[in-house]
Amino acid sequence: MKKTKQKGRGMFTLEEVRLRPLLDTAIADVEEIENLAFCGDIAHPSYRPWTPREIYDFSTAAGFTSLVARVEPGYENDHVLGWVNFVQEVQDGHQAVRIHRLAVHPSSWNRGIGTKLLDQVTVRARVWVHQLDQRGFDFFSCNGFTVTVNSGPLVLLHRKPTRPR
């Protein structure tokens, strides 16, 4: 696969992107992504960037998992490209994943980073998401999800089964 150059985040292919647990050393990169992704024309005014303290607290809380997408060290790009924070739980008797955050650095949008993070998290078919704006709705729709329940700040998404090729 051909490498594509993207300003600010280096040259890499999606195959070179690895998902790793969030370490303290990456919190500054995640904060930058938060500030770029969760400000501006967001549909929900209560949606705001998380502070470094919130990133740390939600990443170390019992049951929560935070993953970062990054190109392995040694490449031109060693910055975090995106991140996800989630917890697995039981909702209405079904295993589900509640995604608290999923964000990709704007310079890496439309390169498969968000989908790679989402695929790692959504082993189960039911996903709860906090406050879904139009851009988020479009992202989940493109990845095979439909809205099942929309109850205020929580939205239940259900992934359509995929057919073998």
Image (spheres, rainbow, N blue to C red):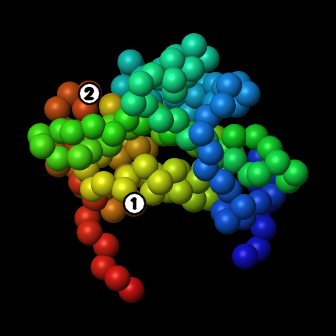
Of residue 1 and residue 119, the one placed in the foreground of this image is: 119
Report helix, strand or loop for mark 1: loop
| Residue 15, label in figure | none
Residue 111 appears left or right of 122: right
Tell me where residue 142 appears, x and y as whole percent. 39, 60
Tell me where residue 59 appears, x and y as whole percent. 52, 27
Residue at position x 43%, y 44% in the image: 135
| Residue 153, label in figure | 2
Residue at position x 33%, y 62% in the image: 144
Q: Is residue 99 above or below residue 19?
A: above
Label 2 is placed on what type of residue?
Pro
Packing grade of label 1 (10 A; few <14, some 14-19, many >=20) is some
| Residue 143, label in figure | 1
The quarter of the picture where residue 119 lies is bottom left
Residue at position x 81%, y 57% in the image: 11
Residue 136 appears left or right of 126: right
Q: Where's the N terminus, which quadrant? A: bottom right
Residue 129 in view in this figure: no
Label 1 is placed on what type of residue?
Asn
Q: Residue furthest front?
A: 62
Q: Is residue 96 above or below residue 54?
A: below
Tell me where residue 82 appears, x and y as whole percent. 61, 42
Q: Are marks 2 and 1 in contact (CB under 8 Å)?
A: no
